[in-house]
Image: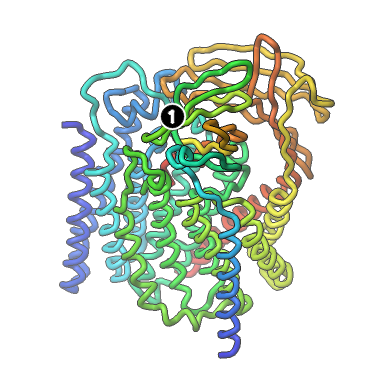
Amino acid sequence: MEIGNLLLMFSSLAAVLSALMFLITLRNGKLGNAVIAENLLYTSTSACLAALLLLVYYFITDNFSIWYVYVNSNVEMPAIYKLSAVWAGKEGSLLLWTFLNLLVTSLFLSAGKKDWTKVKAALTMTAFTSYLLFILTFFSNPFVVLPYNPNNGYGLNPLLRTVEMVIHPPIVFLAYSLSALLFSVILSGSEQAGSEQEQIARLSWLSLTLGIIIGGWWAYRTLGWGGFWGWDPVENSSLLPWLTLTLYFHLRKHREIFAYLTFTSVLFATFVTRGGVISSVHSFGSEYTDYTYLIPLLCSLIPVLVRAKEFGDIKSVCTSQLPVLFSSALIVVFLGTVANLIVNVERSYYLITFLPVFAIIAALVILKIKKMNSVIKIIHLGVIILFLGSASVWLFEHHETLNLGTADGFRLEDILINEDSEKFTVISEIQTPYGIVYPKYLIYKIERRDRGISTVELISYPWVDHYFALTNFDLNKKEVVLEHYTIPLISAVWIGSVLMVAGGILRFSASSIHRTNDS
Amino acid sequence: MGSKKVSLAALLTFIAIAIIVLYHNISPYITPSELLNMNNAYNVQVVGKMSDLRVRDNVTFFKLTDGKAEIEVIYRGKVQQYDSEVVVVGDWDNGTLYAEKILRKCHTEYTGG
């Protein structure tokens, strides 16, 4: 039997037993018994880490008899992308997420004094992670072995061969694990967990924000992904937990509801991306819808429903209308995402509904920013700048497709093709009114048919980006088709984003220092 | 109490507006089998998988299938054959789909987070 499978089964068994032992400890009322549960948790974490490292090893050593490696890799791919290919598919990314869940729970449990809050939170986390491990072992297993040993892999999707692919998924999954932990800690209901709870919330906001921004930067530099924010269901469903978590920080009373909803949104995102609902509506025989993630999603709604009557008493630290504004934004994004599963939703829907809400929020921030302390001010300044940038890009972006030879001011100077062991590269040299650019078209030597991608070339000014990509070429006639986007104030999107992350880091580290002084 | 009611009313009004706006900003995806039952249709979004790709003088011809029926598509420009589903936006006229845009179904080929 495949070692990876054994490790996964061992990890699952240890996680289930750990959850059971946490439950028994709670029933007995003897805190000392938690030691057994704790050690089982560490065992499960170690086995899961071993499974993850084994999968990395299979990728690095080109073990194509493992189906998952075959589908997502090929010999010629650089080692760094082989590493990122570990989480390029459904199975590997679930393994990564499961490991991060276990890691976060282990770190949480081992830090500081053990108390009942920790035991209760660890019970919720281990129970949830056991469920993920169960799916991973039996339905979404990355260690399925092929009956033969292929010479080369099918090849990773060329669009995923980027540095962003190495860092974006782990950061997003870390945020997802932390929001599960936040849910669990709040559910365990201790008042004294206040500062710890706040730290977890801040760290999960920070990683979620960073993850979304890296995703936006990646999407911006990829032709056909709709710019830094394409209102695609996957992006939208990561915006939902961001909105609920951001609102959480702005509430004074009954804010727990929005911490619960953050985890519910995370599970909704998981359902949207992993459930296959996006494809299944188009009724292909091979596609199926996976409803397994709906079970934890519905469970996570229970504490929200129990406290539903408190919705009316929610108090904000800002204006009393803030919860209404954020709820509006949430509902707009949620409706659009759900509708997008069945029909195509035009971008104009979001411009008409989301942008005005964003504008009101930005205006409120401008009114209140004077009274904020310096760190909070940095984050909110980021929000204002991000708003200006987004609004400018969404409303004033301009696109033209140019057939070079006819377009004024654009000239194809040269075009040639190179070959290395991994791919063919078509390089063009194009004179534009803004300077010379060298857009490329890469054709990877892999089995999969979607093997060609356009690279994006940018000429950036502080107020505008000129964005070029080669989408068509004829080497004999020396003709190319060039896509040209004029994107005003995109720099504001990045500056605003950096300020938000910087503020988030300062806030997290400031409160860490504060806590150390306290204790 | 009063302000709470106002907030709730504002939220409900907003949701109502959002639903109306949404209703006017959607266009259904059509499958090739559904399209074959129509004589002509403009600005449709057809979902399917590509096959039999041919390129002649900068014009691409291919077949789009939903597993039940297939239609002929003509696209001015080059396009590669994708393994995953694509959305073809264009006009359907007398048995041929004249594509204006060919979109890959969002970037859900990354099935992670």
Q: Amino acid at mark 1?
A: Asp
Subunit bearing disc 1: B
Q: How many marks?
A: 1
Query: Which residue is found at the position 67% from the left and 57% from the top?
Result: A382
Q: Secondary structure at mark 1?
A: loop
Can residue B107 be seen from the camera position used here?
no
Coloration mode? rainbow
Quarter occupied by the N terminus of chain A = top left
| Left or right for A96, reference A414 | left
Residue A308 point in image, percent of width and height: 41, 78
Work out whether residue B13 or residue A55 is closer to the camera in this orientation and state it. Answer: B13
Residue B52: x and y in percent read: 46, 22
At 51% from the left edge and 69% from the top edge, which residue is drawn?
A: A248
Left or right: where does residue A260 sit relative to residue A245?
left
With respect to residue A131, does A463 lie above or below? above
The residue positioned 41% from the left and 20% from the top of the image is A447
> Which residue is under mark 1?
B83
Where residue A475 appears, as percent x and y from the top left, is: 65, 12
In the picture, residue A306 is in which quadrant?
A: bottom left
> Which quadrant of the structure image shows residue A115?
bottom left
Q: Position of residue A240 (x, y in %)?
A: 50, 59
Compared to residue A132, the image places residue A384 above or below, namely below
> At 30% across and 18% down in the image, what residue appears?
A150
The front one of A279 and A319 is A279
